[in-house]
Amino acid sequence: MFNRIIKAIIAMFFSTTVQATETNIEFHNDDNVQKIAEAYSLDCVDFVRSKFNIELDWSDASILQIENTLESLSNYVKKSGMPSEQIDEFTKMFGFYIGEVYRKNHGGVVWGGVSIDGNKHFGMGKIDTGEAFIWPVLNVSKRISLGAEASITHYYSVITEK
């Protein structure tokens, strides 16, 4: 019995490892996404000012303010529901703001499309290598649907350490 448990644990470990290494992530630079990001991030600043009376200043510290706003939004969506189109708009607005804060304060990245196992998302790639780096719009989507366990402040602290 003990051997079966050990074999099961080993099998889970190796199958997880294989899945992680088989993920296909590609980045394609797209200047149009930069324009979209700028527009949505400005919408985010306006929205947060008008609805929460908070001034976002494009600083790394402003991500904490975004986290608090996303917590409220996540709780609202879980309690009252919201059409998926409206959630998508919030996801883009907050995700592009986070990406623009990173780009303005840390540089070295450009907007474009990230393909993860064939699924396309807005994302950022490294200028020097062309590799996919972050996809904040997707992470905001997770934050809204999963709640605090998908913390944006934690996500941002991890990407700023790279």
Image (cartoon, helix red, strand yellow):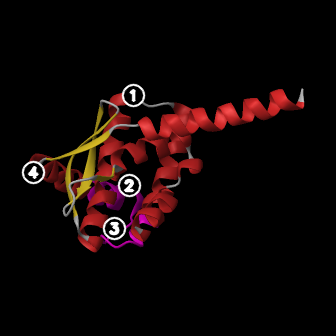
Q: CA distance from mark 4 to mark 1?
A: 29 Å
Residue labelled with disc 1 = 83
User: x and y percent of residue 108 in the render?
Assistant: 23, 67
Answer with mark 3 or mark 1, whichever residue precedes in sequence.
3
Task: Check the image and report above or below for 84 versus 106.
Answer: above
Q: Amino acid at mark 3?
A: Leu
Q: Earlier in the sequence, mark 4 or mark 1?
A: 4
Q: Which of pointers 3 and 2 lies earlier in the amino acid sequence?
A: 2
Vertically, is 28 above or below 41?
above
Q: Residue furthest front?
A: 3
At x 30% / y 45%, what residue is drawn? 92
**Apparent side of residue 88 relative to residue 37 in the rendered image (left or right):** right
Q: Nearer the viewer, mark 2 or mark 4?
A: 4
Instruction: Report helix, strand or loop for mark 1.
Output: loop
Q: Which numbered disc, 3 or 4, marks the residue closer to the eye?
A: 4
Residue range in magenta is: 44-65
Q: Residue sitting at 88 percent across and 32 percent down?
A: 2
Ranked by sequence position, the earlier of labels 2 and 1 is: 2
Residue that mark 4 sits on: 31
Q: Amino acid at mark 2?
A: Lys
Query: Where does label 3 land, which residue?
Result: 56
